[in-house]
């Protein structure tokens, strides 16, 4: 039997569709050429080509099959057209339909060295799907370019029927229509199948300096139910292309995808105003952190990051052995140096947009907590 038959049915993984960022060191290259209006135009082209369609059906009307090339889905009344199932959609359907770890079990089953393994996995899914015939879900599909250049329709997400679709394009259009942020320079932007993030430079008086942090606005969204629509503020260091996430509620605005999406349009203007006001305080806090001495930096990192759920030992060691000792970070004995170390490892290619944003927000949390620990002499004395 061909060894290929022993492999689990593949899922389409999250891909990066647009990714543009500047270069280190030279201030002229730190900011990208495209404006927010240019990004809006790119998103319009993407939306036109993808032709996203939402189908509200129960699981009993959606046939899922484990095949050699991909896991595929078909509507029961249009079985001639199949959709490739993305990893995100599969995980969402798994959580909605199957027992715990059911999706992993079926993936493993579909890869067994048996000619009937994939058929068996399909049959088990069908058995559970036929019992779910009362509660419609929303299945989002979109035309997608495959690695071989062909175009296929992909099942990108499964969300609840109450989920309000709000596209990346709609968000950028709202920001352009209701704020003055269209006049700002773009630091970087990235659009994945599952998420979008755009960072804008809030240029301080006197202009940008490559060795000093400056405030930024961050726009992020997901069209597949993986995150809220978010409008936040933070800091950016051009010397190492590091961002730092928001660190207080005044620089964080988020809207869940439900109800009337018009409330987001109404909220972006208020968000821009409040974030602009709060960003000066964030910059002052970071500058103060550069003067805060830490008696035992590694011990401080262990205590601060080790107490946070979800932070792995791998992340902690990367911060200590790669981040805070990097030449672009502040002194390794300073609170700002620890913050720089966290934001630096967040840029590693192994971290996707969600992990990167989480680490940058983690750095902001460490900044806030560290300032609260400093004594009157701006020292953090770490107990052994």
Image (cartoon, grey):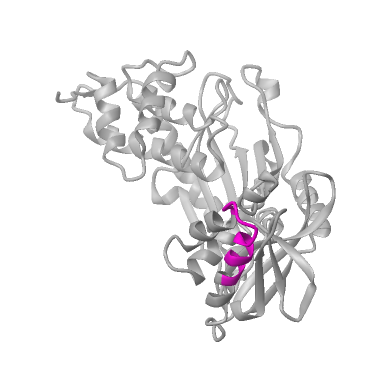
Q: Is residue 181 highlighted in magenta?
A: no
Q: Quadrant of the C terminus?
A: top left
Q: Residue at x 19, y 27 (%)?
A: 375
Q: Quadrant of residue 207?
A: top right
Going 30% across and 42% down the picture, which residue do you hit?
Answer: 308
Q: Using the image, determine if residue 272 lies above or below residue 339.
A: below
* Image coords of residue 198 (percent x, y): 63, 44
* 238 versus 360 height, above or below: above
On screen, 305 above or below 172? above
As displayed, is residue 31 above or below residue 232? above
Region in magenta: 111-123
**Residue drawn at point x = 49 percent, y = 33 percent:** 346
In which quadrant of the rendered view does residue 333 lie? Answer: top left
Which residue is located at x 62 percent, y 52 percent?
194
Residue 103 versus residue 22: which sits nearer the camera? 103
Q: In the depicted view, which residue is nearer to us: 121 or 373? A: 121
Can residue 13 be seen by looking at this rendering?
no
Which is more toward the observer, 106 or 272?
A: 106
Tell me, yes or no, if residue 94 can be seen here: yes
- How many labels, in total? 0
Provide residue 213's location: percent of width, then percent of height.
51, 27
Q: Residue furthest left?
A: 383
Asked if the stretch drawn in magenta spans residue 118, the answer is yes
Residue 34, how many percent across, how many down?
76, 37
What is the x, y in percent for residue 217? Answer: 56, 43
């Amino acid at each position: 039997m061909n060894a290929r038959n022993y492999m689990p049915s593949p899922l389409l993984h999250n891909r990066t569709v647009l990714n543009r960022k500047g270069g280190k060191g030279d201030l002229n290259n730190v900011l990208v050429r495209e404006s927010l209006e240019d990004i809006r135009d790119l998103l319009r082209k993407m939306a036109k080509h993808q032709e996203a369609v939402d189908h509200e059906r129960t699981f009993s009307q959606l046939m899922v099959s484990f095949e050699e090339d991909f896991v595929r889905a078909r509507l029961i009344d249009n079985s001639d057209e199949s959709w490739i199932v993305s990893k995100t959609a599969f995980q969402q359907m798994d959580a909605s339909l199957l027992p715990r770890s059911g999706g992993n079990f079926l993936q493993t089953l579909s890869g067994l060295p048996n000619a009937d393994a994939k058929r068996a996995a399909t049959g088990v899914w069908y058995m559970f799907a036929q019992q779910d015939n009362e509660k419609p879900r929303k299945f989002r599909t979109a035309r997608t370019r495959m690695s071989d250049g062909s175009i296929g329709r992909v099942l990108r997400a499964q969300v609840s029927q109450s989920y309000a679709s709000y596209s990346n394009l709609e968000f950028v259009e709202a920001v352009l229509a209701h704020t003055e942020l269209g006049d700002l320079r773009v630091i970087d932007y990235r659009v994945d199948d599952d998420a979008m993030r755009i960072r804008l430079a809030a240029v301080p008086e006197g202009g940008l300096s490559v060795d000093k942090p400056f405030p930024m606005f961050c726009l992020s969204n997901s069209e597949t139910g993986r995150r809220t629509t978010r409008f936040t503020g933070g800091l950016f260091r051009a010397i190492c292309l590091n961002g730092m996430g928001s660190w207080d509620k005044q620089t964080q605005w988020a809207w869940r995808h439900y109800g009337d999406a018009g409330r987001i349009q109404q909220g972006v203007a208020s968000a821009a105003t409040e974030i602009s006001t709060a960003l000066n305080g964030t910059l002052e806090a970071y500058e103060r952190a550069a003067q805060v001495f830490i008696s035992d930096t590694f011990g401080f990192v262990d205590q601060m990051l080790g107490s946070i759920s979800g932070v792995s030992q791998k992340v902690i060691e990367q911060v200590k052995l790669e981040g805070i000792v990097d030449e672009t970070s502040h002194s390794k004995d300073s609170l700002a140096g620890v913050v720089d170390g966290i934001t630096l490892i967040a840029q590693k290619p192994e971290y996707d947009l969600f992990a990167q944003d989480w680490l940058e927000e983690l750095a902001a949390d460490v900044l806030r907590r560290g300032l609260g620990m400093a004594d009157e002499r701006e020292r953090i004395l770490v107990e052994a």
